[in-house]
Amino acid sequence: MSVPIEQLLDKHFPTFLDTDLVEAIKEHATYVEVEEDDLLMDIGSKINTIPMIISGSVKVMREDEESHELLLYYLQPGETCAMSLTCCMAFKRSEIRAVAQEKVTMLTIPVEFMDEWMKFRDWRSFVMNTYRMRFEELLDAVDSIAFHRMDERLLKYLNDKSNSLNASEIHMSHQEIAVDLNSSREVISRILKQMERNGLVKLGRNKILLLE
């Protein structure tokens, strides 16, 4: 790695001001690179490290008893995985699947430091803010399912996906989107075609360009 860990922390985790915490991270963190579509964590696997995302985007999902996947959230630079933290604190195996949407760089922290570093105010704030942010996203997801039509949910999904990738063109099949939204490919295709007629998107083969 050409960039020192302290410089990465300063840029992507600027709330870590405690020099003792920074020194602890520098001593125990490992710099990791993963490629697009690589599996970072799977359901049932033992959690050995906590990810701290430096660049790229990670898709985090759960799975029901019939192996249907449900999108939970995306991890962006400067973030960590709330579900990983929860499983670590409860000494449980992973309840989520995490997949890189693009090339991802991150720092990984051995799980044994999760509790030990709670003595640092900056680390406590980081953990609690992670939980708060994911809880707010969960409320948004519940509101979306309970109160919004599928076309509204689809448009929000596409905008969230675009923001997570920092790109207006999304490379996904209609089936992949249907899985994330717990819908059918036919429904998603029909809504996307209507959105194209309304000038909201431009459709291509396994790609969608957001126009607004």
Image (cartoon, rainbow, N blue to C red):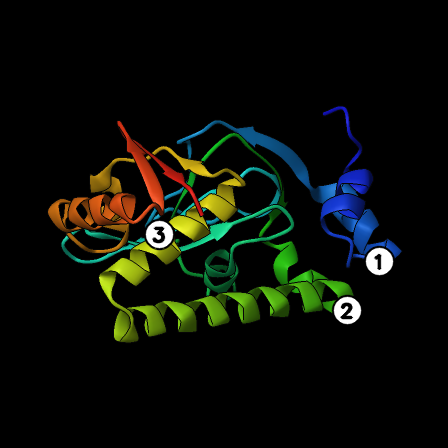
Type of amino acid at the residue the image marks with label 3 = Met
Q: Is residue 36 left or right of residue 23?
A: left
Q: Nearer the viewer, mark 2 or mark 1?
A: 1
Number of marks in the rendered image: 3
Q: Secondary structure at mark 3?
A: strand
The residue under label 2 is 121
Q: Mark 3 or mark 2: which comes first in sequence?
A: 3
Locate residue 134 relative to residue 8 in the image: left or right: left
Inspect this view and state whether residue 95 appears.
no
Disc 1 designates what residue? 17
Q: Secondary structure at mark 2?
A: helix
Q: Which mark is residue 66?
A: none
Mark 2, Cα crowd under 10 Å, few <14 / some 14-19 / many 20+, is: some
Task: State the residue lying farthest toward the front.
Answer: 198
Q: Is residue 23 left or right of residue 197?
A: right
Amino acid at the residue labelled 2: Arg
Q: Work out whether 8 lies above or below 132.
A: above
Q: Earlier in the sequence, mark 1 or mark 3?
A: 1
Q: Residue furthest top?
A: 2
Q: Is residue 98 visible?
A: yes
Q: Residue at x 25, y 41 (%)?
A: 176
* Residue on which disc 3 sits: 61
Q: Is residue 149 left or right of residue 135?
A: left
